[in-house]
Amino acid sequence: MSTLQELIAQGEHVQQDFKFRIDDQKKIARTLCAFANTKGGRLLIGVKDNRKVAGCNPEEEFHMIEGAAQLFCQPEVNFTSKVWQDDFRLVLEINIEPSELKPHKAKDDEGRWKSYVRIDDHTTAANKILENVWKEQKKPQAKPEKFDEEELSVLRLIREEGMITLSKLYRKANLPLRKIDRLIVLFICWDLVEMIFQNDGTFYKIK
C-alpha cells in the first residue's frame, strides 16, 4: 500500500479531510482556519468522501487554496503542499500546522467573521469559552496559590458531575453566568479543567 493509500485508509478525522475539488473559497477557508485553530491537519484534494481517488488539477486547486488562505482567512493561514500520483491521477495534499496566531477567522454564510475548530471529522464554529481561552492565553493571569470559595464551588461541581455542560453548570452553580464563564476560561488556562468536544455537545471535566 502506498503512503497516499495509507493516508486515505485513515478516513476523515480531526486532522484529515477529503475534498473532491474546491468550488467555494469561503467555505474551504473555514476548514483551513479550523485546522490552524485546533491540532493542524491535512486536506487531500482529489479524493471523494468514499475514499476513492478521483484526481484533480493540482495547479488549479493550489490557487483556490492560496486565495482562500490569503483573502478569506483572518489572519492568513500558512500551509505547505505536495502532489501525489495514484496511477494516472494526481492528488494535492495541503498541510497546515497548529497556529500560534489563533484564532483564525473565516466568514460564515451571513458574511460574519467567526472562529472555527475541528471536532472529529467536521468543521464547526468555536464556542465563546474557547475564544476567550485564546484571548486569555495571550495575556495569562497567574494561577493563585489558594482558591476562593466561588472558585472551589465550581471546581467541586465539575468534579462531582464527572463531565458537565456549561448550561448545566449555569443551573447548578449559584453564580452569575459571566462569572462562571470567566472561571471556566481561567481553569482551562491553569490546566485544571479540559474541554471535551463530543457529537452530543461540549463538556468540561477536571484534568
Image (cartoon, grey):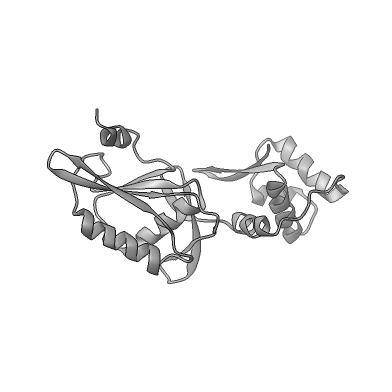
The quadrant holding residue 88 is top left
Q: Position of residue 96 (x, y in %)?
A: 42, 50
In the rendered image, the residue lying farthest to the left is 88
Q: Position of residue 143 (x, y in %)?
A: 79, 48
Name the image quarter holding the N terminus.
Answer: top left
Tell me: 41 left or right of 115.
left
Position of residue 10 relative to residue 56, above or below, is: above
The location of residue 172, given as percent across then percent down, is 75, 48
Does any portion of residue 46 appear in the rendered image? yes
Residue found 29% across the figure and 47% down from its top: 82
Relative side of 119 to 58, left or right: right
Q: Is residue 157 left or right of residue 28?
A: right
Task: Please tell me which residue is depicted at 42% across the width and 57% down the height of the picture.
Answer: 78
The single residue placed furthest to the bottom in the displayed view is 111
Q: Residue at x 19, y 51 (%)?
A: 56
Q: Position of residue 24 (x, y in %)?
A: 30, 63
| Quarter of the figure with the C terminus | top right
Q: Which residue is found at the position 80% from the left and 52% from the top?
A: 174
Report the label total.
0
Query: Could you tell me if residue 170 is visible in this image?
Result: no
Q: Is residue 74 left or right of residue 70?
A: right
Q: Nearer the viewer, residue 71 or 173?
A: 71
Does 1 appear above or below 91?
Answer: above
Residue 194 vs residue 168, the one in the foreground? 194
Observer-nearest of 24 and 190: 190
Give residue 135's quadrant in the image: bottom right
